[in-house]
Amino acid sequence: MYITTRKMNTLLSIEKRNAVLLKMASLLQKERKAIIEINKKDLEAYKGDDISMYDRLKVDNSKVDEMIKSVTHLASQNDPIGVELFSFKHDNGLQVYNKTSSFGTVLIIYESRPDVTVEAAGIAFKSGNKILLKGGKESLCSNLKIVELWHQALKEENASTSWVEYLQFNRTETQEFLENPTQKVDLIVPRGGEQLIAFVKQHANCPVIVSGRGNNFVFIEKEADLEMALKVIINAKTAKISACNALDKVLIDKNLPNKEDFINTLISNLKAHNVEILGDETISKNYYIEAIKSDDIWYEEFLDYKIVVGEVDSTQDAITKINKYSGGHSASIITKNDTEAKSFMENVDSAAVYQNASTRFTDGSQLGLGGELAISTDKLHQRGPIGLQHLVTNKWYVYGNGQIR
């Protein structure tokens, strides 16, 4: 059933917004077992063979802990609304301010992850936005239970349940809503695979922030600490394969000292973690691993126990290759040479760049934001994790006493 309301919600006080968030944290704790049991229905109903999808779908005690931590942290953060960005006193006495302001209504379309139903709604609500949640059919039971808790938290704090709404639409209904929304939508965030993103961009009639693919790279520069490099690669590849910040490609400087020993050790460690290893022409020939069949594989995000290893001539070659093939998400250089690292980090066109660290840190909570609505690979209006302070626009406040121009 379509929503027909067009009335904009009146901004709640920061005290009221925080109270709702803390109430939600309490309800998540209280309903922990029920959430996990209901999630089992979604898990049992899932018939696909996508292990990353299944991993994102699953809710366990650790996942509930993360949900609780997310909304609790949001409640502790400063109000992102009304923050002064600029002020100016005109010669004629006009006092001018530019301040942050909520977007209004945000629609997020996402796949599989029930924790997004907590985190995205919490960030939107705290930043004064109404949120429309359109989750995937595979997580329907979990999502509806969590939205039920949002509505309970809102009611108990005497706030309208319309702040958080769930759109139980099929694909055809979703397309119709994108093309002819029955209420004003100010911003859409698709969070999922490339097909979902393309679908939303094709049919949406308002601004879209793309939470794009990962396809992240690590470059092992010739002055790398090899023990560190091995540790970073194994973590970035195997810690959580379903994450968009997981590693897909490794580039190795051809002048790396002890290169053969390092690559053999890397291959051995990756195989011990059941990672399928593919190599470019040089690596596959010299280290007896399967060769890539086409350069197109350099564009792919795997979300699986799979990795491509290649050799490059220099830092500049690594930069060129990453900028050509990556998803613009995250890239890391392992090196003791800060000059090479600076060149790499300044010239790689990704939302997050690292020296001597795993790409797995590209995450709102890990980068100090507390949580994230999504990780944007767009450059406007926000790049990288979209946290509480980013889900705002701005407007001008001008105070006068009869001035005319």
Image (spheres, helix red, strand yellow):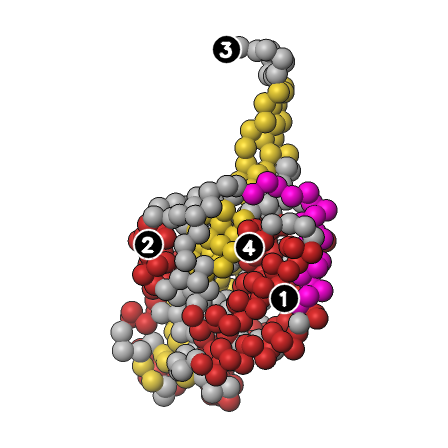
Front label number (1 vs 3): 1
The correct choice, above or below, for 319 with respect to 106 in the image is: below
Res 164 label: 4
Q: Is residue 127 magenta?
A: no
Q: Residue at x 60, y 47 (%)?
A: 127
Mark 2 or mark 4, which has the lower sequence index?
Answer: 4
- Residue 73 drawn at (x, y percent): 69, 58
Q: Nearer the viewer, residue 283 or 153?
A: 153
Q: Which residue is mark 1?
A: 67
Circle 3 sits in a helix, a strand or a loop, which is it?
loop
Mark 3 or mark 2, which has the lower sequence index?
Answer: 2
Circle 4 packing at 10 Å, graded few (<14), some (14-19), many (20+), is: many
Front label number (4 vs 3): 4
CA distance separating discs 3 and 2: 45 Å
Q: Which residue is mark 2?
A: 176
Q: Dividing the image into 4 quarters, which one contains the N terminus?
A: bottom left
Which amino acid is tagged 2?
A: Glu
